[in-house]
Image (spheres, helix red, strand yellow):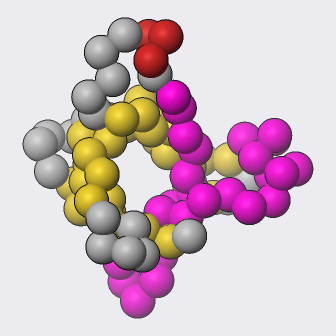
Amino acid sequence: DVCSSDLQFGDDFITITDEDGVEYELEVLARFDYEGATYLALTAADAQEAEDMEVSILKAVEEDGEELLEAIEDEEELEKV
């Protein structure tokens, strides 16, 4: 799954649009590089309590000059990251 990202609401929040056109507001917890690739740790922007927080890690890829975020399909890559 590939999603486009546009920075909105400052540096710590982004809105992504999935392939079905559904928008999600996410908080960027961390942006980091690992083995030559860039990854973002994200959670729902409306998560109120730490126990409600689900963290997702998406891989940043560049396509046609635009930064896209994609799910990490490779379980080994996800475990390493």
Q: What residue do we see at 39% from left, 67% from top?
A: 18
Relative placement, left or right, of 36 versus 56 is right
Of residue 31 and residue 52, the one placed in the foreground of this image is: 52
| Farthest right residue in view | 76
Task: Assess whether residue 63 is covered by the magenta stretch.
Answer: yes
Q: How many marks?
A: 0
Q: Residue 73 at what x, y percent from top left?
A: 74, 61
Residue 32 visible in the shown view? no
Relative placement, left or right, of 26 versus 36 is left
Relative placement, left or right, of 19 versus 27 is right
Of residue 2 and residue 38, the one placed in the foreground of this image is: 2
Q: Which residues are magenta?
A: 54-81
Please tell me in which quadrant of the rendered image residue 45 appears.
top left
Q: Residue 22 at what x, y percent from top left?
A: 30, 65
Residue 34 visible in the shown view? yes
Q: Residue 31 at what x, y percent from top left?
A: 47, 41
Of residue 4 and residue 62, the one placed in the foreground of this image is: 4
Q: Does residue 40 lie above or below 66 as drawn?
A: above
Q: What residue do we see at 83% from left, 51% from top?
A: 75
Q: What residue do we see at 88% from left, 50% from top?
A: 76
Q: Does residue 13 lie above or below 60 as drawn?
A: above
| Farthest left residue in view | 9
Task: Assess whether residue 71 is covered by the magenta stretch.
Answer: yes
Q: Does residue 3 lie above or below 43 as drawn?
A: below
Q: Does residue 2 lie above or below 16 as drawn?
A: below
Q: What residue do we see at 55% from left, 52% from top?
A: 58
Relative placement, left or right, of 60 versus 27 is right
Image quarter (top left, top right, bottom left or bottom right) of the C terminus = top right
Image quarter (top left, top right, bottom left or bottom right) of the N terminus = bottom right
Q: Residue 65 at what x, y percent from top left?
A: 37, 83
Of residue 68 and residue 3, the one placed in the foreground of this image is: 3
